[in-house]
Image (cartoon, rainbow, N blue to C red):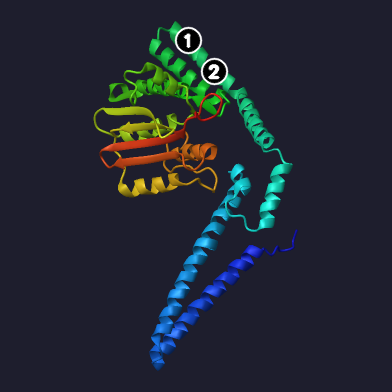
């Protein structure tokens, strides 16, 4: 289609800008006349205050709601949201609101989500063809190492195969915290072959020291697969690896305010205030320009991408916050909803 579309929203924006300019010129003219010809300046003050109140009201009642609605439409077009599109707080017109409601009645949103999930699972299953070759190769290396008496090589190969099997093979969107922590411990075991005693890991549960049942309950909450490993990897490579002396990693898990909160702390190099500010700005909102990779990264899944996955699944009120001081280590806090086996939050 070569015909250029004329959008009413663009024409409204042009008219609003022209109206603001004319109002500003009118105020300037009144002040000019008052100051030059000695007219009553009280009229200029009243007009200025009225114009300021009017502009503030326009911003609150029109500009800000319009920006929110426009953002939701942008996210829907890019495929980031579906539910929010059908529950816009500020519809453009009563007719547009009725049209969206009518569209909501015509389509089966649950079926639409299931189709997207099945497509993702199909791609994941398709990608399992090559991993089988990887597993068989690693098992062959492990067998040869055992025959040669290289027990350390065999153990590392087995741990690596377990890590890849968890990372690549499972197609579920959500896994239990227990499985995620088991993967972390396996990943830490692999890293010990490289760092030895230089690296230590501890896992603690808030207010669970004397309540084992509470700890078991927390372990059954669900979260996106590979939420913790990329953060632990960042802590090792960007925090502890270049540190002189031993490095310590601590994962502290707790439940508060109907949220699952996981804090990953290291006593590594930390980061500058400016770098920390830029990182938290990227983590604060869902990126609309696709998957974003962190610069100078040595591998794995970027923390920004983990944050995006959390926000896409659960909403922008959840995600990752980073606290750090240069030379004193870094804390990464992951905030998640309490999701049980049935995918629902407990009442």
In this rendering, position of residue 66 left or right of residue 194 = right
Query: Badge 1 local density, few (<14 within 10 Å), some, or many (20+)?
Result: some
Please state if 79 lies on the left or on the right of 294 as rendered: right
Within 10 Å of disc 2 (Cα), the crowding (few <14, some 14-19, many 20+) is some
What residue would you read off at disc 2? 135
- Say if 129 sits above or below 87 in the image: above
Distance between mark 2 and mark 1 Cα atoms: 14 Å
With respect to residue 13, does 235 lie above or below? above
Q: Position of residue 75 (x, y in %)?
A: 58, 48
Q: Is residue 339 above or below residue 213?
A: below
x 35%, y 28%: residue: 252
Q: Quadrant of the N terminus?
A: bottom right
Can residue 224 be seen at all in this image of the molecule?
no
Residue depicted at 44% across the width and 8% down the height: 146
Identity of the residue drawn at 60% across and 71% down: 15
Q: Identify which residue, 221 or 203, lies in the foreground.
A: 221
Ranked by sequence position, the earlier of labels 2 and 1 is 2
The residue that disc 1 covers is 144
SS at circle 2: helix
The relative height of residue 193 versus residue 18 in the rendered view (above or below) is above
Q: Position of residue 4 (x, y in %)?
A: 71, 64
Residue mark closest to the camera, 2 vs 1 = 2
Q: Quadrant of residue 296?
A: top left
> What percent of the width, then of the height, locates residue 99?
70, 51
């Amino acid at each position: 289609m070569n015909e250029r579309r004329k959008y009413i929203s663009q024409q409204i924006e042009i008219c609003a800008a022209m109206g603001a300019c004319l109002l500003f010129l009118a105020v300037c003219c009144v002040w000019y006349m008052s100051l030059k010809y000695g007219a009553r300046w009280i009229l200029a003050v009243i007009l200025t205050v009225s114009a300021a109140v009017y502009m503030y009201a326009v911003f609150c009642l029109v500009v800000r709601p319009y920006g929110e609605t426009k953002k939701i439409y942008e996210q829907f077009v890019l495929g980031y949201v579906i539910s929010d599109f059908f529950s816009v707080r500020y519809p453009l017109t009563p007719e547009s609101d009725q049209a969206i409601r009518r569209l909501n009645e015509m389509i089966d949103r649950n079926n639409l989500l299931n189709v997207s999930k099945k497509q993702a699972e199909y791609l994941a299953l398709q990608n399992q063809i090559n991993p089988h070759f990887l597993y068989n190769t690693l098992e062959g290396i492990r067998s040869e190492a055992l025959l040669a008496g290289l027990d350390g090589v065999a153990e590392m190969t087995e741990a690596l195969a377990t890590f890849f099997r968890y990372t690549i093979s499972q197609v579920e969107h959500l896994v239990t915290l227990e499985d995620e922590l088991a993967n972390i411990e396996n990943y830490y075991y692999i890293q010990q072959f490289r760092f030895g005693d230089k690296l230590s890991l501890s896992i603690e549960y808030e207010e669970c020291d004397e309540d084992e049942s509470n700890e078991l309950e927390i372990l059954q909450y669900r979260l996106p697969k590979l939420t913790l490993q990329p953060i632990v990897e960042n802590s090792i490579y960007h925090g502890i690896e270049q540190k002189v002396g031993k490095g310590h990693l601590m994962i502290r898990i707790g439940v508060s305010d109907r949220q699952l909160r996981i804090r990953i702390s290291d006593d590594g190099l930390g980061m500058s205030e400016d770098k920390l500010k830029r990182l938290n700005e990227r983590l604060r909102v869902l990126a609309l320009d696709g998957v974003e990779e962190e610069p100078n990264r040595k591998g794995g899944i970027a923390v920004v991408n983990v944050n995006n996955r959390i926000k896409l699944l659960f909403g922008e009120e959840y995600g990752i916050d980073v606290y750090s001081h240069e030379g004193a280590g870094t804390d990464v806090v992951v905030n998640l909803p309490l999701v049980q086996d049935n995918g629902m939050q407990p009442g």
